[in-house]
Amino acid sequence: MNYGYFPGCSQTSSAKEYDLSLRKVFEKLGFGLEELCDWSCCGATSAHATNHKLSNALALRNIVLAGKQGIKNMVAPCAACYNRLITSQHEISMHPERKNETEELLSEKIPADVKVINVLELFFKIGLAKISENRKRDLNGIKAACYYGCLLVRPMNINNFDDAEQPTSMEMIAEAAGATTIDWNYKLECCGAAHSIVRKDIVLNLSKKIIDDAVLNGANVIITACPMCHTNLDMRQRAMKRKYPEHLMIPVLYITELVGLAMGMNVKDLGIDLHYVNFNYDEYIAEKLIA
Amino acid sequence: MGAYVNKDAKKLQPSFVSANLLTDTLPENNHTPFQKNNSDIPEEIRNRTFQDVSLCYQCGKCSAGCPVRYYMDIAPNKIVRLIQLGFYDEALKSSTPWICAGCLTCSVRCPKEFNLAGFMDAVREIAVKKKVKVKEKDILKFHKAFLNQIKRYGRLYEIGLVGEYKMKTLDLLSDVETAPGLFLKGKLGLLPDKVKDRKSIKKIFKKTDKKKINKH
């Protein structure tokens, strides 16, 4: 079965490596992803923060496109895009007047049978056993703090996928890939997301708390599934180091990169060399291949 | 046996409870929080979020768990209270809705299932519509710059966004340390990635632009 793929704006620029690793990993797992033709921005925070009609229309334009292209299941790997798409879908399914209003704006009928899923759900659709079967490398040295961020499993009444306070799905995927996972407190705490450019002070403090808690609980890698989280945790660490000289740098990987590493792909192929904090491959991975 | 009905219930009601409890106790002179010209605000919030502000019983769980409460001038639950009581100006002027990161922690935890993050979106939208002087001006400028990229290209053009935002705020020197790195790593596309059917995007913007959100 082919799944639709809604990359989202970040995937084409600042989160290139997420796109790269996702395509490679799923191709190798034998799972076809078909990019949504002529997709547009979901509207992100800026639309829902200032104009709700615009935010619904921008998000649902993509659902209309998916319907036209015969896509029934679509993965949105960016947690923010995913959240915007399912929230708008939920709103029009609950309130017909909002649906009519948006359909009028788009001059199109909005299909009700396009299911949008996140990247964790996609791994579960393939099956964790398949990830374990495809393991080529021992990731024993990786002690992963799985960081969900705020939007991936919320709101629970809409996404019905994992718990909104104590999710465990990412840990299960990381463990299927052979990594060790740690227990920690900040796996759902917000990184400041869209304040990244305007209120760097907020983002720096929030992200620092998250990283510190991961380090305190014995992690040596943070795993994420959201481009915004990745930007804030990875790119801002140099500024953290400048502000707090005792700050310990910790690499931040996308979940798809972790699975890719387990499947024997190399750092360059997965785009891990594009990160700001260097991922010192030899430190974590014993080069022995699993037969 | 029929259900027990206390016929004297009305007589038992204490004398100090009256429908006008709130207005009765307010000073009658100058400062009245109820501004008739603005009284459509709870209704507007209901239209936008499909929920009633009176749902909130002020337990404060939202503010306790809010990761950005520290940066706000008024706690999130107090913004709801201000709206409930009719202090609209105070609520709309506050920095709180702008600092709110929309992380949904409050919405998930609310015992009344009041979607506070959605409520903050509505307050923000009303503040923009009413041209209230916003405390966090730069955040609004950022949102406008962001939406301008979408309007133009259909997708986010990051260089365009940062450029436009910096021109609007004249904050030219921050981020000089991260931008060159992004270029060197080939992460920032020099040219915008455009949607083919940009007409449909422009149409969406035109039709939703009644409030002139992106213009002023």
Image (cartoon, grey):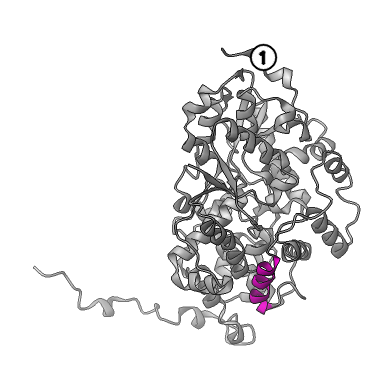
Q: Position of residue B215 (x, y in %)?
A: 76, 75
Q: Position of residue A8 (x, y in %)?
A: 65, 51
Task: Look at label 1 and name its amino acid.
Answer: Ala
Residue found 55% across the figure and 51% down from its top = B105
In the rendered image, the residue lying farthest to the right is: B173
Q: Position of residue A220 (x, y in %)?
A: 67, 25
Q: Between residues A242 and B47, which one lies in front from this camera angle?
A: B47
Residue found 61% across the figure and 40% down from its top = A225
A254 sits left or right of A4 in the view = right
* Other residues around mark 1 within 10 Å, as few (<14) / some (14–19) / many (≥20): few
Classify the position of the C terminus of chain B by image quarter.
bottom right
Residue found 52% across the figure and 77% down from its top = B43
Q: Between residues B191 and B68, which one lies in front from this camera angle?
A: B191
Q: Can the viewer see residue B66?
A: no
Quadrant of res B99? bottom right
- Residue range highlighted in magenta: B198-211
In this rendering, the answer to whether A282 lies above or below B180 is: above
Residue B210 is inside the magenta segment: yes
Chain letter behind tag 1: A
Classify the position of the N terminus of chain B by image quarter.
bottom left
Residue that mark 1 sits on = A286
Q: Between residues A210 and B83, which one lies in front from this camera angle?
A: A210
In this rendering, the answer to whether B167 lies above or below A8 is: below
Residue A123 is inside the magenta segment: no
Residue found 55% across the figure and 23% down from its top = A134
Q: Secondary structure at mark 1?
A: strand
Q: Position of residue A250 (x, y in %)?
A: 72, 30
